[in-house]
Image (spheres, rainbow, N blue to C red):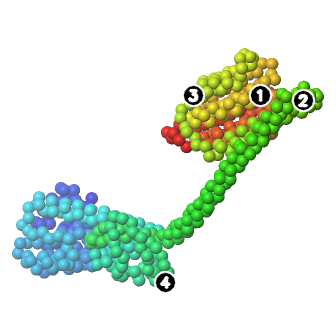
Amino acid sequence: MNKILIVDDETHHLNIYAKVFRESGYVTLGVADLKTAFGALDEFQPDLVLLDIVLGNESGFDLLKLIKSNEKYKSVYVVIITGIKSSADDQAAGLEMGADGFLVRPLAIRELVIRIDAFFRQKRTAEKLRKSEASFRKLIEKNPDAMLIVNSDGKIIFANPAAADLFKAEIDELQNKLFGYPIVHGERTEINLVRHDSEEAIGEMRTINIDWEDKAAVLISIRDITDRKRTEAALKVLNEDLESMIEKRTEQLRLSISEMEAFTYTISHDLRTPLRAIIGFSRLVAEEHGDKLNDEGKILISDILRNTKKMTQLIEDLLEFSRLGTKGVYKKNVDIKNLFRQVFFDLTDETSRSSIDFRIGELSHAYGDSSLLKQVVSNILSNALKFSAGRKSPVIEVECEDTEDMTIYSVSDNGVGFDMKYSGKIYGVFSRLHKESEFEGTGVGLAIAQRIILKHGGSVWAESEEDKGAKFFFSLPKSNGTEMK
């Protein structure tokens, strides 16, 4: 409960005031002279003193002076109450000495209680404000950023230790010094700091309007961003160097592509032309002079035709492989299940189809370039048909598995398989895990399939065991709304 010390030399005032304040929930003590009042300050420890300034031959101002001049009574409110004959000078003198209020009799009892209640509400509010300001002061004092408070004259009235460290000065040196920088409200501002040691620095400043010790002021926070700005400058130089390097590498890549195109042109014209001539002359010899050739000659002509045919196919495969590097990928939804059926039909004749157990599970639509995916399907299916052809009952199975962002397709066969220690070679150009005499091929088909899948953003891999077949996988990203890559 709040305590009220009533100091009045008239007994009936003491009794009336004590009664009404107790009924309102206050603890009261009434005294009629200054000596008793002085002692009550320490013994009773009041929250508010209701003080009559005329106490017989004594003056209530003496008690007011004591309370307001002593630090230990700083939280005690003093409200002067006096008669109507009191002069305006008395009121002014009391307020100048620090009185918190002035009441004049006659005063209705109800009004007196309301006034005193209001003083206590004010006291509680002031106490909360004092604690809030103390917490705020502690917060900005401990803040790792430099914190300054600048008054309406532009002078620094508060600086925390971080501010002293930032400006390389003592806190006392910053006090009452002009801030000196334009104060921009509502946005972050970069400022070039002037330190006492003349070292250059850059600060990021933010401001907010506040009340400080009952006066308008500006709270300024400054963060040292010198290192960050230096890093940004270094990164800018690095990016410029990187861009220059990229331009050079891009130009080198253009030259390499041009050289590749020239090489492709050479293969397609300079190599294929003599090959066609060799094939033509060999067939001419076989057709017009075949009856004059002995068995060994006929075998040689047959070997020439077979090897030139193989060389022609190899050139075609290499051309296709090189063209993939610059070929665009036009993506759309592809019915890949139907694509597998079509390719299987194209790769087999009626006789071979009847002997192959070709199984297709439920396949999700693929998202990719239909012509390129057809080539992938053709190359992988060709591989499965070739290596399972020697089985009594060839089996080829196509399956599909969906993950969150990828669709994985697999083609398995019951063919000859391969040792997994060589799995890293099967997608390389000219890589062969079996003798050419056992299985025909140029060793480029799976390399082409891999390159196409990589261009789609997917991947390829395989699982196998010797003489127990193989399973080839390729994954494709699901549709992301992009139609061309």
Q: Is residue 7 visible?
A: no
Q: Which mark is residue 335?
A: 3
Q: Position of residue 284 (x, y in %)?
A: 82, 31
Task: Give 133 or 250, whichever is nearer the viewer.
Answer: 250
Choose the circle earlier in sequence order: 2 or 1: 2
Residue located at (15% from left, 79% from top): 93
Q: How many marks?
A: 4
* Whole-number angstrom distance, CA of label 4 to CA of label 3: 74 Å
Q: Position of residue 354 (x, y in %)?
A: 72, 16
Q: Secondary structure at mark 4?
A: loop
Choose the circle earlier in sequence order: 1 or 4: 4
Q: Amino acid at mark 3?
A: Asp
Residue bearing mark 2: 298
* Whole-number angstrom distance, CA of label 2 to CA of label 4: 99 Å
Residue bearing mark 1: 386
Q: Quadrant of residue 204?
A: bottom left
Q: Are marks 2 and 3 in contact (CB under 8 Å)?
A: no
Q: Which mark is residue 30?
A: none
| Mark 4 crowd level (few <14, some 14–19, many ≥20, 10 Å Cα) | few
Farthest residue in the front direction?
Answer: 288
Task: Give 215 or 248, whichever is nearer the viewer.
Answer: 248
Q: Which mark is nearer the camera, 2 or 1? A: 2
Q: Secondary structure at mark 1?
A: helix
Q: Is residue 186 visible?
A: yes
* Whole-number angstrom distance, CA of label 2 to CA of label 1: 28 Å
Choose the circle earlier in sequence order: 2 or 4: 4
Residue located at (64% from left, 58% from top): 252
* Whole-number angstrom distance, CA of label 1 to CA of label 4: 83 Å
Residue bearing mark 4: 197
Q: Which mark is nearer the camera, 2 or 4? A: 2
